[in-house]
Image (spheres, helix red, strand yellow):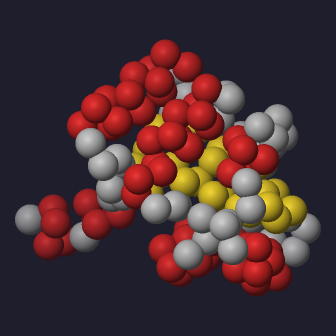
Amino acid sequence: MSKLRVGIVGVGFIATLKHLEGLKANSDLCDLVGICDLDLARAEKAKAAFAPDAYTTTDWHDIVNDTSIDVVYVCTWNVSHAEITCAALEAGKHVMCEKPMAVTGEEARRMVETAKRTGKKLTIGYQNRFREDAQF
C-alpha cells in the first residue's frame, strides 16, 4: 500500500497540538505534503516542526487543487468548514474536518451530500467520542 498524501488547511491550536502530531507519528502511512494557513509564518513554523519537505501557502485552493494530495484536513475557522470541505470533496479528496462540522444544518447536509455524490470519505473530528465519560 502506498502512503496517503495529505494537505492541511489551517495550522492553529488544534492542528498543531493534535493533527500534525498525529500525522507525524504515522509517517509510515502518510506524507504531509502541503500546509496552508492565512499566516504564512505560522505555516512555515508548522513545516519546520512537522514536514520539512512540504510546501506552504496562504491559499486553501492550492491544497484543494493539488492533484497529488489524497486527503485534506480542514482545521480552519468554523464558518469556512463547509466551503473548503465541499471544494476538496469535489476535487476528489477525502476530508477530515475539525469540529464543529458546520455552522448550519444546511451546510452540514451539503457536506454529507457532496461526500455521497463524489464517493469520497468525510469524517468530522469528534475525538471525544472515545473517552470513557463520553461513552458512558
Counting from the top left corner in percent of width and height, residue 10 is at 60, 64
Q: Nearer the viewer, residue 5 or 35?
A: 35
Which residue in the rendered view is the most extreme toward the left?
A: 136
Q: Height in image: 91 above or below 36?
A: above
Residue 113 seen in the figure: yes
- Image quarter where the C terminus lies is bottom left
Residue at 72 percent across and 44 percent down: it is 61
Residue at 30 percent across and 49 percent down: it is 103
Q: Does 16 sit left or right of 44 as displayed?
A: left
Counting from the top left corner in percent of width and height, residue 29 is at 72, 55
Counting from the top left corner in percent of width and height, residue 105 is at 24, 37
Q: How many marks can you see? A: 0
Find residue 55 and report its image quarter: bottom right
Counting from the top left corner in percent of width and height, residue 5 is at 76, 49
Q: Height in image: 107 above or below 127?
A: above
Residue at 56 percent across and 75 percent down: it is 12
Q: Does 54 sit left or right of 13 as displayed?
A: right
- Image quarter where the N terminus lies is top right
Q: Does 29 sit left or right of 84 as displayed?
A: right
Residue at 78 percent across and 47 percent down: it is 62
Which residue in the rendered view is the most extreme toward the top?
A: 117
Residue 29 seen in the figure: no
